[in-house]
Image (cartoon, rainbow, N blue to C red):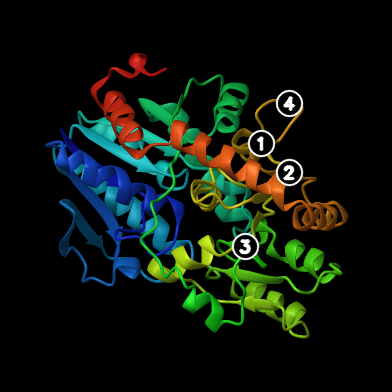
């Protein structure tokens, strides 16, 4: 099959779940004999307009767009949809709801099958103003109308489309990336003044919906000061919010900001964590949480539906990790204290989480299931 991909910023991935997702499944499709053109943003790829590069066999076409928040996504999406319509593809796959605003183009003006992946309800994100949020919501409705198939990455999103639009979707989750080998002596971690297994790790974009400010407030209330808090991630169009985080942490030397880290340093930082915390109030299917679980790191997360899906075996327990009341600083403080004081329980939870991820989240299976959707045999999915 000849496949076009619209909506991803580009690959290789720098930051962002969609980009990591694309970097996993599309090289696998190429290795299986399919052709993939991924339309990227020049502001992300740092390549001249319309230059084509290759990433593990995937043709990455750089589209001209300014480095302006929102405008770059809009321009790249409409250009990507136009290019996908102009050329002959078997499948045009849109990622995210904003780019899906242009699903009508290949649907009406080509013979390609149109597929949309919803990685989250992006119109709910704090960084978008009213007009941008409305455009993204319009993209959601356009996807419902024009997409031949809609893929969702969590069961909560599947429920949302059923209840809101009476639209059937296909649940295919994300999977965690496999980290590279890292320094077993934790030299990078120690260079930051950290002791392995004696720090809490937040890994992700420093944006309001991930609630790193709540975690900082909770950490400030901890009496046990032989632990430290590490916040690793870039600001992703929320520079003022990130600046407010450093301001509220300025008088506490036990709170460390690393910025975005990759490769060996990232792997070492995650593997050295004593507790991974994700306090988000909005997620699709959080790759960072999956990666921590895959590495056997104890996890604590807010009690939102995607986190419950990952951590709770049934309605009465969360035996693969700990959940706290979303947005509740007092409960977060209490749960962190409990985690620090119950290391044996955490080891057991972390092992269950590792086994659960291994059994249920696999990129080869995800790739094969996606190809079944492309070929029209989605009824084979369980």
Mark 1 is surrounded, within 10 Å at the Cα level, by few (under 14), some (14 to 19) or many (20 or more) other residues, namely: many
Q: Earlier in the sequence, mark 1 or mark 3?
A: 3
Q: Secondary structure at mark 1?
A: helix
Q: Earlier in the sequence, mark 3 or mark 4?
A: 3
Say if mark 2 contacts mark 1, CB within 8 Å: yes
Drawn side of residue 242 relative to residue 8, left or right: right
Q: Secondary structure at mark 2?
A: strand
How many numbered discs sit on the rendered protein? Answer: 4
Q: Quadrant of the N terminus?
A: top left
- In the displayed structure, would residue 13 be above or below residue 113? below
Spatial CA span between label 1 and label 4: 9 Å
> Residue 39 appears at what percent x and percent y?
26, 53
Q: Earlier in the sequence, mark 2 or mark 1?
A: 1
Say if mark 3 contacts mark 4, CB within 8 Å: no
Q: Which residue is tagged 4?
A: 315
Q: Nearer the viewer, residue 123 or 313?
A: 313
Spatial CA span between label 3 and label 2: 15 Å
Q: Residue at x 44, y 71 (%)?
A: 265
Q: Which residue is tagged 2?
A: 323
Spatial CA span between label 2 and label 1: 8 Å
Spatial CA span between label 1 and label 3: 18 Å
Q: Residue at x 41, y 47 (%)?
A: 99
Spatial CA span between label 3 and label 4: 26 Å
Please identify the residue farthest to the top as the structure is shown.
Answer: 379
Q: Which mark is residue 202?
A: 3
Q: Quadrant of the C terminus?
A: top left
- In the displayed structure, would residue 63 be above or below residue 349? below
Say if mark 3 contacts mark 2, CB within 8 Å: no
Q: Nearer the viewer, residue 332 or 122?
A: 332
Q: Secondary structure at mark 3?
A: strand
Can residue 302 be seen from the camera position used here?
Answer: no
Say if mark 1 contacts mark 4, CB within 8 Å: no
């Amino acid at each position: 099959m000849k496949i076009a991909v619209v909506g991803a910023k580009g690959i290789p991935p720098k930051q962002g779940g969609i980009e990591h997702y694309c970097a996993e499944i599309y090289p696998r499709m190429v290795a299986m004999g399919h052709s993939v053109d991924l339309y990227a943003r020049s502001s992300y790829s740092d390549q001249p307009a319309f230059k084509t590069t290759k990433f593990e066999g995937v043709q990455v076409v750089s589209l001209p767009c300014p480095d302006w928040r929102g405008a770059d996504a809009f321009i790249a999406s409409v250009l990507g949809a136009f290019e996908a319509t102009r050329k002959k593809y078997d499948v045009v796959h849109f990622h995210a709801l904003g780019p899906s605003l242009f699903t009508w183009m290949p649907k009406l003006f080509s013979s390609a099958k149109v597929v949309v992946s919803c990685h989250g309800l992006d119109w709910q994100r704090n960084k978008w103003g009213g007009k941008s949020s409305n455009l993204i919501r319009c993209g959601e409705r356009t996807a419902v109308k024009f997409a031949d198939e809609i893929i969702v990455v969590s069961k909560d999103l599947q429920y949302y489309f059923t209840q809101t639009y009476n639209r059937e979707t296909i649940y295919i989750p994300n999977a965690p990336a496999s980290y590279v080998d890292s320094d077993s002596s934790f030299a990078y971690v120690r260079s930051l003044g950290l002791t392995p297994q004696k720090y809490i790790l937040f890994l992700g974009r420093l944006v309001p919906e991930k609630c790193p400010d709540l975690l900082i407030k909770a950490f400030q209330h901890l009496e046990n000061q032989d632990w430290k808090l590490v916040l690793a991630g870039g600001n992703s169009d929320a520079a003022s919010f990130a600046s407010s985080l450093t301001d509220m942490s300025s008088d506490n030397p036990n709170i460390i900001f690393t910025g975005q880290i990759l490769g060996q340093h990232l792997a070492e930082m995650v593997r050295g964590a004593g507790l991974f915390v994700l306090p988000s109030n909005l997620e699709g299917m959080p790759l960072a949480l999956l990666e921590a679980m895959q590495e056997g790191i104890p996890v604590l997360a807010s009690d939102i539906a995607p986190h419950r899906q990952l951590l709770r075996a049934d309605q009465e327990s969360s035996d693969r990790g700990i959940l706290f009341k979303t947005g509740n600083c007092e409960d977060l403080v209490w749960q962190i204290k409990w985690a620090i004081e119950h290391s044996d329980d955490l080891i057991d939870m972390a092992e269950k989480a590792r086994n659960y991820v291994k059994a249920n989240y696999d990129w080869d299976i995800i790739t094969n299931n996606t190809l079944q959707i492309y070929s029209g045999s989605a009824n084979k999915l369980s």
